[in-house]
Every structure is written in structure tokens, then in C-alpha cells.
Image: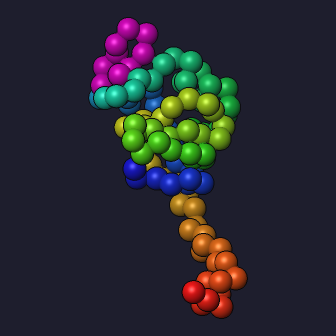
């Protein structure tokens, strides 16, 4: 997985995906998951300039979920990273701070 939770990514356009993968029925098959017209419609309605924030991901099945739209997104559907989330330091327990074992 290329991206992590909190990253802002730009989603590719319908035309770009159609050119690379071709149409399959009403949608576009991007390897394991497809892009549906309703996903494109949701992006247009949001007026978010195709920029979404990653809410979660499933490493086993290689897909992301986004905060703004509840569809499954894959690396092939993402054009680029817009903003990387800063990694947080893990919270230490009092035992780790005092190095008690």
C-alpha cells in the first residue's frame, strides 16, 4: 500500500481510467475493483477538486476507504499524493518511560 491514513490523495479522472483500463459494462475494471459512474458523480458533486482523505485501508485486499466518500478505492484509481500525514510518535506507557520490567 502506497498511502497511509490521513494522507490526502488526488483521484484520477474517468477519462484517464477509461483510457488505461477500458469500459466493462457500465463501469471501468481496474484490476481487482471497478470504478462505477456513481463514484465519478459523487466526486463531481463534492466539488473537492478530486482530493480525498484516506480514512482506512485493507492490506489483505489492497483497497482504501476515504472520509468524504464511502466507496472502495485502489492505487490504480489514485493519481498522486497531495499531502502526506505526519507520522505520530507512539504513546509510551509509564512502564516504558520508567523502563520498568
Q: Quadrant of the C terminus?
A: bottom right
- Residue at 48 percent across and 35 percent down: it is 73
Q: Position of residue 71 (x, y in %)?
A: 56, 29
Q: Is residue 86 above or below residue 18?
A: below
How is colour applied across the structure in the image? rainbow
**Viewer-proximal residue, 36 or 64?**
64
Is 81 positioned to the left or the right of 18 in the image?
A: right
Q: Position of residue 52 (x, y in %)?
A: 59, 43
Is residue 63 visible in this depiction of the protein? yes
Q: Residue 92: within the magenta?
A: no
Instruction: Place residue 66 in its image quadrant.
Output: top right
Q: Residue furthest front?
A: 101
- Residue at 40 percent across and 50 percent down: it is 1
Is residue 18 visible in this depiction of the protein? no
Instruction: Place residue 46 in its image quadrant.
Output: top right
In this picture, which residue range is highlighted in magenta?
21-29
Q: Position of residue 67 (x, y in %)?
A: 65, 41
Instruction: Place residue 65 in its image quadrant.
Output: top right
- Residue at 47 percent across and 42 percent down: it is 58
Q: Position of residue 25 (x, y in %)?
A: 38, 8
Q: How many marks?
A: 0
Q: Is residue 4 above or below residue 92?
A: above
Is 99 positioned to the left or the right of 34 in the image?
A: right
Amino acid at each position: 500500500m502506497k498511502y497511509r491514513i490521513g494522507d490526502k490523495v488526488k483521484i484520477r479522472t474517468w477519462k484517464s481510467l477509461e483510457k488505461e483500463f477500458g469500459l466493462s459494462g457500465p463501469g471501468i475494471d481496474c484490476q481487482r475493483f471497478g470504478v462505477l459512474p456513481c463514484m465519478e458523480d459523487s466526486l463531481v458533486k463534492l466539488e473537492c477538486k478530486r482530493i480525498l482523505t484516506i480514512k482506512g485501508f485493507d492490506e489483505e485486499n489492497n483497497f482504501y476507504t476515504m472520509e468524504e466518500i464511502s466507496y472502495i478505492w485502489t492505487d490504480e484509481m489514485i493519481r498522486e499524493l497531495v499531502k502526506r500525514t505526519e507520522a505520530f510518535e507512539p504513546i509510551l506507557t509509564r512502564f516504558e518511560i520508567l523502563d520498568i520490567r
